[in-house]
Image (cartoon, grey):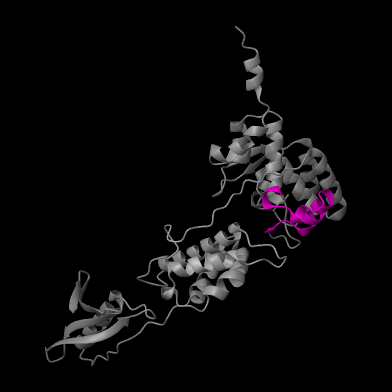
Amino acid sequence: MLKSVGGKYEGVWINELKNGDVSYYINYRDADGKPTRTLVGKKTSASDFTARDAYAKLIEVKYKLQHEEAPKISAGRVKKVKFDDIWGKYLEWAKNNKKSWQTDSWNYEKHLKPFLGNRAVKEIKSTDFESFKTEMASKTNAKGVKISNATVKHQLVLARHIVNYALKNDLIKDYTNPIANGRVRMPQIDNARLAFLTKEQAKELLEILWTLDRQTYHLTKILLLTGARLGEVTSLRWQDINFDTNTIFFKKTKRGNERHIYINDSLIETLKELSENQKSDLIISTSTGGQLLKMPAHFDTAIEAVIPGNKNKEAKQKITAHSLRHTHASWLAISGLDILQIKEQLGHKTIEMTMRYAHLIPNKRHEATKMINI
């Protein structure tokens, strides 16, 4: 049954079929003044035709009639938009707006493209992403290790961002993101690492890196002495260093608060040596002056020498680059620093994130209890 769209699309009529397809018609008077209704397009699983498109056809027809031209009307179909199409546009945007665009590109080519690339976006449903999630979780990486929940979640988040970008920029219309607003359950991730280095292990690690690779040595040392995230350190610029007050300023990010970290004597040595060999305004950079995107492989080599078998340990017990941040916080707790100050040092947004270190703080409560006698 035909019904008028009305509103700002006055003159456009639709016929909704049982299979979900929609036919669009326009009403107008022809050159002789005779009322005319013409099919101008269809919305199907392979077509993005909308009421807006139909209304544009109506305006075009009226314009030609007013100028005594014979309108040519065809029931047009909009080209099927594939996931690869919207990814291409997203990548163009990411190159100018995201420091991590290369990581996004690698993940898309490795994981998302084989599953989604050649499919029409509007045919992809939440159940497809659930299938993708299940398939990803059953895979192993090149080393034969099962793909982590964190990796699976990263792919889902990237796919959600790509679709949101396409919707925001009208690359696709009349479509609801099937992976947004909880429509797909994200894998549960426990990022709480339990393992951290002792000071003796940290010294041994740095001694090995000193002879193995000087830049990785400096990067590891900065991570240990600031407790900052890898991305925070690799994006540091010399303007963020204040040698007058001996502080490093870490900017606010989506994951952490802004903060100033004190530069001790050991860290000053590292920063001064780095300043003598600058390749760009970044504190730590690639050989061409760009930003490092991941920890150099020399780190894993050195860790394996300090802790044999580390690479095969369970995730929570394995020492990684992020464990250097956990190590710094654990050392602060063991030294007696209170939870609120540790929170400020790490830039945590909530106290809950910092509470994992509470058990390491020397417990003065029991000693105080012993002193209560009646």
Q: Is residue 216 magenta?
A: no
- Residue at image point 64% right, 36% down: 357
Question: Residue 247, relative to residue 310: is it above or below?
Answer: above
Looking at the image, residue 15 sits to the left or right of residue 331; the answer is: left
Looking at the image, residue 288 sits to the left or right of residue 338; the answer is: right
- Residue at image point 62% right, 59% down: 148
User: From where the camera sits, is residue 148 visible?
Assistant: yes
Q: Is residue 295 magenta?
A: yes
Q: Considering depth in this image, is 186 or 353 the residue closer to the camera?
A: 186
Q: Quadrant of the C terminus?
A: top right
Q: How far across and how far down the image is residue 252, in percent?
A: 56, 46
Q: How far across and how far down the image is residue 272, in percent?
A: 79, 44
User: From where the camera sits, is residue 262 visible?
Assistant: no
- Examine the image and state in which quarter residue 279 appears: bottom right
Looking at the image, residue 267 sits to the left or right of residue 165; the answer is: right
Q: How far across and how far down the image is residue 91, in percent?
A: 55, 69
Q: Considering depth in this image, is 367 or 235 the residue closer to the camera?
A: 367
Q: How far across and how far down the image is residue 4, in percent?
A: 18, 75
Highlighted magenta segment, given as a residue range: 291-317
Question: Residue 25, relative to residue 109: is it above or below?
Answer: below
- Examine the image and state in which quarter residue 183 appears: bottom left
- Examine the image and state in which quarter residue 196 appears: top right
Question: Residue 149, relative to residue 54: is it above or below?
Answer: above
Q: Considering depth in this image, is 296 or 358 the residue closer to the camera?
A: 358
Q: Quadrant of the N terminus?
A: bottom left
- Residue at image point 17% right, 83% down: 28
